[in-house]
Amino acid sequence: MNSAPFSRLTPIGFLQTFVLELMDLCAEAGISPTEQLIERIARGAGRFFEEAFRAEYGVEGNLDREGYADLIVGLKNRIGGHFSLVSSDSTCLRVVTSRCPFGEGVRNAPELCRMTSSVFGGIAARNFGYARVVLEERIALGDSGCTVAIHLTGTAAGRQDGIEYRGGDEPAAEPEGIEALQSRIESRMHDLWRQMNARRTALPDFEKPSIVAESPAMQSVLRAIETVAPTPATVLIRGETGVGKELVARAIHALSERADQPFIAVNCGAIPEGLVESLLFGHEKGAFTGALEVHRGYFERADGGTLFLDEVDALTPSLQVRLLRVLQEGELERVGGHRNLSVDVRIIAATNCDLERSVAHGAFRKDLYYRINVVRLDIPPLAERAEDIPRLVELILKRLAARYRKPIHGVTPALMERLRTYRWPGNVRELENTLERAILFATGPQLDNVELGATEPSIPATDPGFRALRRQVLDRLERDYLEDALHRFQGDVARVAAAMELTPRAVYLKLGALGLDPALHRPARRARRGDGPA
């Protein structure tokens, strides 16, 4: 938002404020992607500006490079920029600026840089037949200035990450390609989600799995998913805790030829060391004390489908050897077994650590590393995906509002700005937890404040009444949620635990503390009590 004094308000500042407010409105209304709207506005405006330039200076025919540079530099400087041409040859022009026409407000709406790309690219494509605009530095992302390179041939552009325009002012692939791809991925994920939740005939949209990809970084991830999913290649997903690695793995499975086969997710770091081997590879009856029957491990259960091994770096050296054998030979042997079993499983592994360093230190086998690192996908942290935050906030709030039965419809613009600029060390998971803490104590239709970086809501610690009230509120909300989950999953504690991302033991402890009996929600018990269907 323009913070200039009222007495210094200008027509430029007035229009800039309108554009920024339009961006906020698009984000709050869930218009996705907002770049699509900007692209259309900028293409039309670019044609108008070029016509005005030609009329004023009597230019006919295609612009040469000098005329094109005069047009784009003059255009930006007349609306408040400080642009200059720093280099120009037959294949590329490069311009720089130390001041953005949108002022400091552009840091809160980096999507506005799309206007520069579309205006520059559209005009260049009409006059030279091709353009790829690369935003090399951006004030919007914290750089001291902006550097924009307009490549006039595909060869000159090489593999640089930019937006292409061909023969006119339409971009070659974006944004329509990304929007269609995202829709296709989500459609396949929703189909699988409905199969897994067959008893839930009316699954709300906000509970369906979605990959938010408003940012260029996540759009690149979607492209990679589209490329690798149909192949049999083993995939290694790398990213910080809480970025959504399992969601990406599910998307790969959903687009693969194995989509109608099982998807099994295992957190290797959350399983007690003594149980990992049995759970992964299974065991025979009598293999150890307590092994009263044959147990099919995760590999057998995932046969024909996909096995997602999160925190794969947590596997011990002996388990790494067994995993390597499955990858190389497609065979395994249960604990206590004496025969080889063939399995056809696609492995998607994930880690939040530097596996190369683990290999160098001898903590992770080099041969296994090369086996699982056939294709690597790097999921960017939320701090590099500011464009995704408004949509993520919208989806999370819808889910939380339904869970806690609170009429929360969004956040204030001031709070959205705080959320966009916070570093989010815990990524999407931290964003979810932060919003959940805030919604518990919200009283209005919009959230206007959250505690960033805190572990608990802010309540006066010296007032016992406030502490007791907080405990009562949290207990009541937790009890309501658990009762709803037990009813939804028909008393199946394992499924309740999976939905809450807890262990069954932790859920049983919560149920015991709150005096809830899961058996009362099972079909046979409800039938005896005369309850209706779930």
Image (cartoon, rainbow, N blue to C red):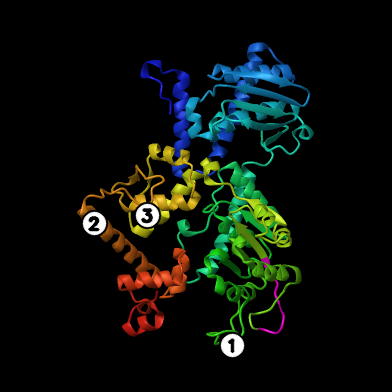
Residue 144 vertical position relative to residue 34 in the rendered view, above or below: above
Q: CA distance from mark 3 to mark 2?
A: 21 Å
The secondary structure that most of the magenta stretch takes on is loop
Marked residue nearer the N-terminal end (1 or 2): 1
Tell me the SS state at disc 1. Answer: loop
**Quarter of the figure with residue 72:** top right
Labelled disc at residue 380? none
265 inside magenta stretch = no
Disc 1 marks a residue whose amino acid type is Gly
> Which quadrant of the rendered structure holds the N terminus?
top left
Tell me the SS state at disc 3. Answer: helix
Give the farthest residue toward the top. Answer: 57
Q: Where does label 2 land, which residue?
A: 469
Q: Residue 76, percent across and down?
A: 58, 20
Q: Nearer the viewer, mark 1 or mark 2?
A: 1
> Which quadrant of the rendered structure holds the C terminus?
bottom left
Q: Nearer the viewer, mark 1 or mark 3?
A: 1
